[in-house]
Image (spheres, grey):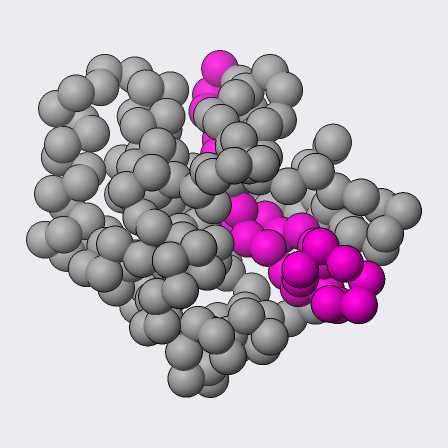
Amino acid sequence: MELIIESVNLKDYLQEDLPIIEWNTPAIQKIIQDIEDHCETPFEKAKMAFEYARDQIRHSFDTQYLDVSITAEQTIESHEGICFAKAHLLATILRGMGIPAGFCYQRVLRKGTLESGYALHGLNAIFLEEIGWFRVDPRGNKPGINSQFSVKEEMLAYPIRTELGEIDYPNVFVHPLISVVDAMKSSKNTQELFFNRPQEI
């Protein structure tokens, strides 16, 4: 897929977006320091950051955790978050290390059936000098889902079935979608958020 980059200025993908994308906090700085202690290249740092967001943060829909994490800080504190929160966290860690990162979305069937309706799913795009832009999905793996840090061929959480009305949006946004953040803020818990997620960008 040819990605549509919202801004040609890479500096825009290195910005904080308070309070959601904020890396000058003790919790975020601790993660960044640990990654930088173990990695040398931007590629290695990006891969370790992805694996942290994918593997160390549980997906709230999988665990039925009720509190809604929105910011990167909240997501670290709870070790829980849905796809949007995990994407917020990954972008925060990457930007905090000087690696440009953006926000991407897909429209998927909420429960895999037409009757269940559609909802947005959030993931990330990363820019590395030697590679360019590529997408990764920190959603979290489980049986049937195998998302990997892959720069040659995308290995995302969900195969998009266009014949069922699902959409793989090519956009790489500088900021999280306002509609997504508003849905997260207005939902009393993740059970409510499951149905409150926007259906399209």
Depth order, front residue of 191/139:
191
Q: Is residue 98 left or right of residue 144?
A: left
Q: Is residue 178 left or right of residue 36?
A: right
Give the position of the C terminus as an image quadrant.
bottom right
Quadrant position of residue 95: top left
Question: Can you give x and y, in whole percent of width and height, for residue 198 in the image?
Answer: 64, 71
Q: Is residue 32 above or below residue 115?
A: above
Q: Measured along the vertical axis of the image, is residue 57 above or below residue 115?
A: above
Residue at the (64%, 41%) spot, across then down: 158
Q: Residue at x 35, y 66 (%)?
A: 65
The residue at 31%/57% (across/down) is 80
Q: Position of residue 142 (x, y in %)?
A: 47, 39
Q: Which residues are magenta?
A: 102-130
Q: Main secondary structure of the magenta part?
A: strand
Asked whether residue 139 is in view, the answer is yes
Residue 147 on image: x %, y % = 52, 32
Q: Position of residue 163 (x, y in %)?
A: 89, 47
Quarter of the figure with the N terminus: top right
Residue in the foreground of this view, choosing between 69 and 61: 61
